[in-house]
Image (cartoon, helix red, strand yellow):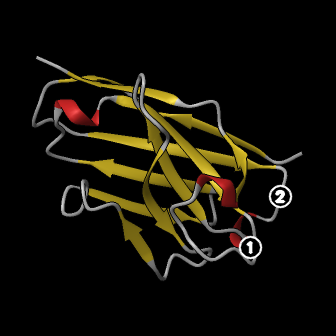
Amino acid sequence: QLQLVESGGGLVQPGGSLRLSCAASGFTFDSYAIAWFRQAPGKEREAVSYITNSGSWTYYADSVKGRFTISRDNGKNTVYLQMNSLKPDDTAVYYCATRRPGTITWNNPSNYISWGQGTQVTVSS
C-alpha cells in the first residue's frame, strides 16, 4: 500500500529554517514524481514545489523561489524540502503527494493520487 509520511515541521522564528522530509513506502519510489503542497487555515491547498522521479527537474511556486529547495534520495525513498528565510505567510500544514502518471500540470492537487498526513509549520516570533 502506497504510504507517505511527512516529518520535520515545527515552530520557527521569521528568518529561520526547517527541513521537511517525506518518507515513502509501498511503491516503486523512483517511478513517481513528488510534490509538496501546503494549506493554511481558511485557504485552498497550494502547490509549493515539485521534483521529477529522477530528480532532474524541479519547480517552485513564485512565493518560495529562492528560499525553498526540493530534493530527493531515491536510495532512501525520501523527498526533502529545505525551507530558508521563512516568513509568517509560510505558516501552514505541509503535505507531500505522488503525481498521477500522464497528468500535465504539476501544481494541480487533482493530479495527485496519494497524500501524507501533513506536518505543521508555524513561523512566528
Cβ atoms at labels 2 and 1 below 8 Å apart: yes
- Residue 26, given in percent of the width and then of the height, sits at 84, 50
**Residue drawn 64% across the image and 30% down it:** 117
- Taking the spot 68% from the left edge, 43% from the top edge, the residue there is 115
Q: Left or right of 52: which side holds 92?
A: left
Picture residue at 32% right of the left edge, 51% below the top: 82
- Which mark identifies residue 31? 1
In the rendered structure, which amino acid carries the disc numbered 2?
A: Phe
The answer to whether 118 appears left or right of 19 in the picture is right
Instruction: Tell me the number on the disc at residue 27.
Output: 2
Q: CA distance from mark 2 to mark 1?
A: 9 Å
- Measuring from the top left, give residue 50's x and y in whole percent: 48, 64
> Where in the figure is residue 103, as x and y percent of width and height?
69, 74
Rendering quarter of residue 101 = bottom right
Q: Is residue 68 left or right of residue 58?
A: left
> Front-most of 76 and 80?
80
Give the secondary structure at mark 2: loop
Q: Farthest residue in the top direction? A: 125
User: Is 114 placed left or right of 72 in the picture?
Assistant: right
Q: Residues within 10 Å of mark 1 (few under 14, many from 20)?
A: some
| Amino acid type indicated by mark 1 | Ser
Q: Residue furthest right?
A: 1
Q: Secondary structure at mark 1?
A: helix
The image position of residue 19, as x and y in percent, is: 35, 43
Q: Quadrant of residue 39?
A: top left
The front one of 60 and 15 is 60
Crowding around mark 2 (Cα neighbors within 10 Å: few <14, some 14 to 19, many 20+) is: few
Q: Residue at (74%, 78%) from the top-left corner?
A: 102
Compared with 87, 66 (above or below) is: below
Q: Which image quarter holds the C terminus?
A: top left
